[in-house]
Amino acid sequence: MFHAVIQERKKFGPLGWNIIYEFNNSDREFAFSTLRMYCDIGFIPWDALEYITGEITYGGRVTDSWDLRCLKTILKGFFSPSTLEPGYTYSKSGVYYCPEYEKLEEYRDFVDTFPIIEEPEIFGMHENANIAYQTKETQTVIRTMIDCQPSTSGGGEGKSADEIAFELAEGVIQSIIKKIYTDNAHPHLFKRDKKDRLPSLTTVLMQEVDRFNKLLALIHSSMNNLQKAIKGFVVMSEQLEEVYRAFLNNQVSFCFKLVATKSYSILSRYP
């Protein structure tokens, strides 16, 4: 159960783990063998079990300190003396617990009664975590549907996809400046103090201008290359293909987002 919980937390993205870890069956088998070995000695050394399982078997893969802390907290819900008490459940809902059966088929039938879609509480998370997960899944479905749409028009007098993309690229080139020049800034921003230091806000502003200029340079170079690729002057690379598809769907290209601050704006309102 513990292995399944930490595996399924990955579906919640950064809410589940700060870093995605590849826990596998060998981790589970080693944890089983360790548990079996300690149970055979007549008493259960809980501290040793928690350390070996939490710090070594599974924790050895965890590189983030907060993730390790979270993993060990989850483990305490499965490796502690209270788990052997009658009526103990692994979640507040009471759906998940360890029944006392004698046959394997009975355990399988019990597992089949589990909900098909698990609630976040079994993973130690708030119910709002499902909203983030469902939003992510919905976006994936929408992107897949968009990618499946034909990129060429069906004939007639309408413009072709190439013509639309070319005009959009031309519109971006004409509407967005190529560079922000600090020479146009107000002189008061560069007034130094008695120790010949610039104001801290000016320093931050200069850094932001530098980053924004990198974004502007990328946008203009991408637009020029896209127009050349549409005309057949250069090869349509994978990056240009992504820009091409994004333009046809009024979306901001992923390559722009890599060098810019996070934005949910559509193409017509970007940057």
Image (tube, rainbow, N blue to C red):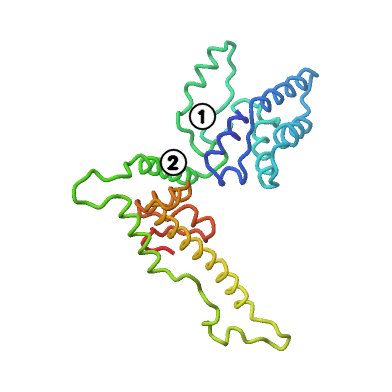
Q: Earlier in the sequence, mark 2 or mark 1?
A: 1
For residue 211, above or below residue 147? below
Q: How many marks?
A: 2
Q: Residue at x 70, y 34 (%)?
A: 58
In the foreground, 36 or 247: 247
Q: Are marks 2 and 1 in contact (CB under 8 Å)?
A: no
Left or right of 49 on screen, residue 174: left
The answer to whether residue 111 is above or below residue 244 is above
For the N terminus, the quadrant is: top right
Please name the residue shown 69% across and 44% down the image.
69
How many neighbours does mark 2 have within 10 angstroms: few (below 14), some (14-19), or many (20 or more)? Answer: few
Are there few (<14), some (14-19), or many (20+) residues within 10 Å of tag 1? few
Q: Is residue 14 left or right of residue 59?
A: left
Furthest residue in direction front, as rendered: 233
Outermost residue, left side: 156
**Left or right: residue 149 compared with residue 119:** left
Tell me which amino acid carries mark 1.
Answer: Val
Give residue 230's position: percent from left, percent from top: 38, 52
Residue at 33%, 51% (x, y): give it.
162
User: Which-is-in-front pick, marks 2 and 1?
Assistant: 2
Residue 233 or residue 55, whichever sits in front: 233
**Residue 31 % position (x, y):** 70, 26
Q: Report which residue position mark 1 lands on.
A: 95
Secondary structure beneath label 2 = helix
Residue behind mark 2: 137
How far apart marks 2 and 1 lie (CA) works out to 25 Å
Q: Is residue 189 left or right of residue 223?
A: right
Q: What kind of residue is marked 2?
A: Glu
Asked which quadrant contains residue 8, the reply is top right
Name the spot of residue 33 as percent of width and height, x first: 73, 21
Q: Which element type, helix, strand or loop, lies under badge 1?
A: loop
